[in-house]
Amino acid sequence: MNEFSYPRRVRLLTGGDFKQVFNRASLKISDQHLLILACPNDLGHSRVGFVFSKKNIRLAVNRNRVRRIIRESFRLEQQQLPNVDIVILARKGLGDMENKQVHKLIKRSWSRLINKAKPKSQSK
């Protein structure tokens, strides 16, 4: 059960953590409603952080709902993800999506991230 937990060590917590991802993002997964930026880390596990502005998701209820869905998906997919720091940025319309659509979107985004990260790790 511990391998599926969501402890502090798998979260981007400080402004410096986020800034590092923004400055060194080598992996970008872009979608109409979502942008994922990622950069490799040496921690042996992936970490995730969120940037959901009021401009893009108006209501706090929707920001929190989408964040919970993505956090849960990250927790379950964590074993398959490469060792990267991930920042997820919301775009307009993400908060208006149904839960099922958000699940499908983030599942597809995780797959794309895994596939994009594979050639980079194999070329070393």
Image: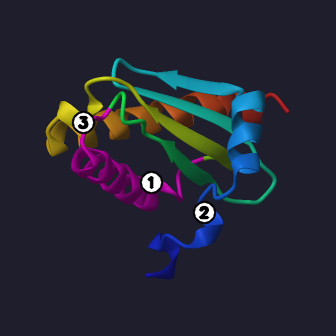
Residue identified by numbered label 1: 74
Q: Earlier in the sequence, mark 2 or mark 1?
A: 2
Task: State the residue at coordinates (30%, 46%).
Answer: 66
Real-space CA distance between mark 2 and mark 3, rounded to the nearest whole angstrom: 24 Å
Q: Are marks 3 and 1 in contact (CB under 8 Å)?
A: no
Q: Amino acid at mark 1?
A: Phe
Residue 120: in magenta span: no
Q: Nearer the viewer, residue 43 or 17?
A: 17
Q: Give the residues in magenta.
A: 57-81
Relative to residue 47, is residue 101 depicted above or below?
above
Q: Which mark is residue 95?
A: 3
Query: What is the C-alpha distance between the residues marked 3 and 1?
Result: 18 Å
Q: Quadrant of the N terminus?
A: bottom left
Which residue occupies 67% across, 59% down? 45
How far apart are the two marked residues, 2 and 1, measured between alpha carbons?
Answer: 10 Å
**Number of other residues with Cα within 10 Å of mark 1, as a class: few under 14, some 14 to 19, many 20 or more:** many
* Earlier-in-chain disc, 3 versus 1: 1
